[in-house]
Amino acid sequence: MKKLILVQIFLLVGVCAFAQIPSPTQIQQMRVENLSDEEIRQLVAEMKRNNVSFDQIDSYAQQKSIPASEVVKLKDRIRMLNLDKELTGNDKPPVVKQEQADRSVNDGTIISAKDIQPMTEEERKRAKIFGSELFSNKNLTFEPNLRLPTPPNYRLAAGDELVIDVYGYSEVQHNLKVSPEGHVRIPYVGPVYVNGLTMEEARIRVTKQLSTIYGGIKSGNTFVQVSLGTIRSIRVLLIGEVMRPGSYTLPSLATIANALYVSGGPGENGSFRDIQVIRNGQPVTTFDLYDFLRDGDLTNNIVLQDQDIVKVNPYKTRVELTGEVKRPAIFEVKEGETLQDVINVAGGYTDISFKDVIRAYRINNREREVVNIAAEEVATFQPSSGDKYFIDAVLNRFTNRVMISGAVFHPGEYALESNMTVADLIKKADGVKEEASLGRAIIFRLKEDYTPAGISFSLEDVLSGKQSVALSREDSVVIYSKLELREDYQVKISGQVNTPGYFAYIDSLHVEDLILMAGGLRDAASLKRVEVARRIRGKDYNPSDSAVAIVAQFDITADLSPLARFALQPFDEVIIRKSPTYVEQATVSIDGEVVYPGAYTINSKRERISDLMRRAGGLRPEAYSEGAVLLRKTFVNSSDSALLESKLQVYYNKLQDSADIYNVQNAVSRKEQLLGINLDEIMKHPGSKFDLYLEEGDVIRIPKKLQTVQLFGEIYFPKKVRYDKGIRFRDYIRGAGGFTSNALKRRGYIVYANGEVKSTRKLLFFNSYPKVKPGAEIYIPKKGEQKGLSGQEAVAVTTGIASLALIIVTILDRIR
């Protein structure tokens, strides 16, 4: 309901929004003729958004007590602007023609591709007719301007509204409607006949009548102003070759162009140049749209009157212009006009048109024919209906062009002059560049049959005058550069420089220069034994010579002063090695139950774990030395990682749900190997085989005393239990429910807190289980799957046993 009210308000006032709802009196006083075309479009857009169809306008207006005359005017205005189709079938997507889609894209409106239908042949033909775009362009309406002063020749008729303003000693204002009999009724004066009068004549007559009751008018103290309020509507009939013939209601200021626009313009066979206005049975004018399109002349675009008939006659002569004219289209031709007149309407020739001969395709009495029209005949050639004229373009070729490219200062295209040679062309190009290859250059030439050919010459001989090479039209001279004819010269430096990589080679480049180009030496660079590897180039083949590179070694100075004076050649590779005495600080870390945990720098290459323990203050009382572990980096590059990753993953699988899983995960992510160490032996016997040398990145972790044992694998109730010194391996198993039927008892093993692993040993017919310590993890693996014999395998085994038994019996019989 709210939507309907909003539409009613917008329907009556022609605006998008209002602060207050108009009163019923204001609604009844609103006039559709006061709305502009843009306001009508906004109204239709709002109705469309609210799903109000064109047929529902009457019922909505009746609910609001809107005068039927205003509804009729509104619907006529909507038809005039060709907007009635937009309100038809709002529940279905609109059918959009191709040209409408193009305009919608330009207007910013989004139209789905599925809603676009291709134009019919009739629509495509009409779109090619010159002038038809006037009636398909939404931005051009020929809307009459109702806000201009009333034209002096405008004559009043029934339906017009006069605004009579009396001011001075007496002040009063009247808005009076001209009655069907042609009168306006002035209060206290009576009816005054104004039908057929101009505004000036009406002012004189009204002033004369008012002077009878207002004495100040004669004395000059009171004045009267008469103006036109709202104008009347007229009915105009459009007939003939129009898109939508019929009767239309238009404002009384509407012209022929307005009437043509609301009817959709001339149809496919309609004339744009023979449009008649018939008034009272007699033709009063003939309107030619080409006068407006060609010269902007609207002289014959007269104001229509009520009951006028606008007749669009069929065209008599139409021709089509294609090719190199500025506005290719189908043009209508009047009697007496020539082909030159048609070309002028098309805007004339384009810049690249070929004017010597125009080809025409004409239909004679029996068949088609081709007509050649010379340039001097165009001004007198009489077009015939159905003619098609094609204006060709000039050839895309040059009559006197030569080209030069490559190692010259100004390459490009030049005019071919009489007896011009290659030397002349090079001179016009400001000469050859310094890197030009003087030995040989090439001319790419087109023969008489336009097949390509090549002519080579010595550039040095041409420049010195020893050789003269004549040029022909369309010759292309190519001067090659020495730099382009060889591989890019580079040198490479690697090792201890700040920016290693490839650099462009330049002549007289030395090793020290290349080091500077690479950003200088790193702090770790060695000044000794700088090595240069050089390609073997330009050497004769010798089967006994196995050398593949030339290597030179020498020393340099810290300030890169010229010492070696080793000149580089293209593709040399320089290697700056690291100094053998240069050692960066190496750091190790000790965590857990020591007095001073943290990071420590290795003092010497022979520093051991025991030395680090002394520097860390030794163990705390609550430390569990048997659980100490060492995390050590295991590889440097990715090629070493595959095997180590697999080993670490196996160990990780063994530690599922264990207390050390976090440490192991960190070790795997840092590419570190978890090593078990015997810290007690290390502290008792420093320097022994258990006391490992420290390496950079080592991490030693010493946990608190552990009080639990974890059980995994093939036992009935795997769990974590309290450690008890007097309980053995089998006792822990029995406490967890015992072995399952799938348990592989002889393969049980223990992983101790420091990562050491001990497995069950076989002693005669008994299993000797390892000792359990605090923090240990007991694992009982699963038996492998035992696959039974298939039927064929059983038959084969049985047959084999039977055969063997038969052989044994046979042997025993022979022995006896």
Image (cartoon, grey):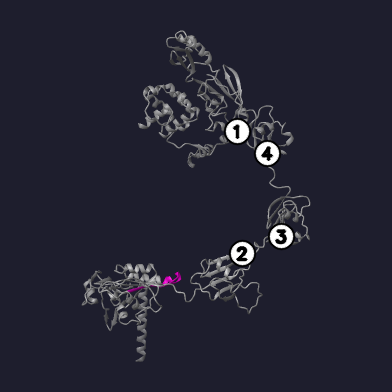
Residue 418 image point, x, y percent? 78, 50
Q: Nearer the viewer, mark 3 or mark 2?
A: 2
Nearer to me, 463 or 3:
463
Name which of mark 2 and mark 1 comes first in the sequence: 1
Q: Tell me the residue that label 4 is attached to.
A: 391
As displayed, is residue 777 above or below residue 92? below
Q: Residues within 10 Å of mark 2 (few under 14, many from 20)?
A: few
Q: Is residue 318 above or below residue 626?
A: above
Residue 488 tag number: 2
Question: Is 740 rendered above or below residue 175?
Answer: below
Disc 3 to disc 2, C-alpha distance: 21 Å
In terms of sequence position, does the residue under pointer 3 or pointer 2 come before the other? 3
Quadrant (top left/top right/bottom left/bottom right) for the N terminus: top left
Residue annotated with mark 1: 129
Q: Residue furthest top?
A: 212
Q: Residues within 10 Å of mark 1 (few under 14, many from 20)?
A: some
Q: Residue at x 49, y 73 (%)?
A: 578
Label 3 vs label 4, nearer the camera:
3
Would you say residue 309 is visible in this rendering? yes
User: Would you say residue 327 sits in the magenta stretch?
Assistant: no
Q: Which corner quadrant of the image does residue 505 belong to?
A: bottom right
Q: Give the residue type that dot 3 points to.
A: Ala
- Residue 633 figure quarter: bottom left
Circle 4 — which element? strand
Label 3 sits on residue = 441
Marks 3/4: CA–CA distance = 43 Å
Q: Please, what secondary structure does the residue beneath circle 1 have? A: loop
Count residues near mark 3 (Cα–Cα under 10 Å), then give few for <14, some for 14-19, many for 20+: many
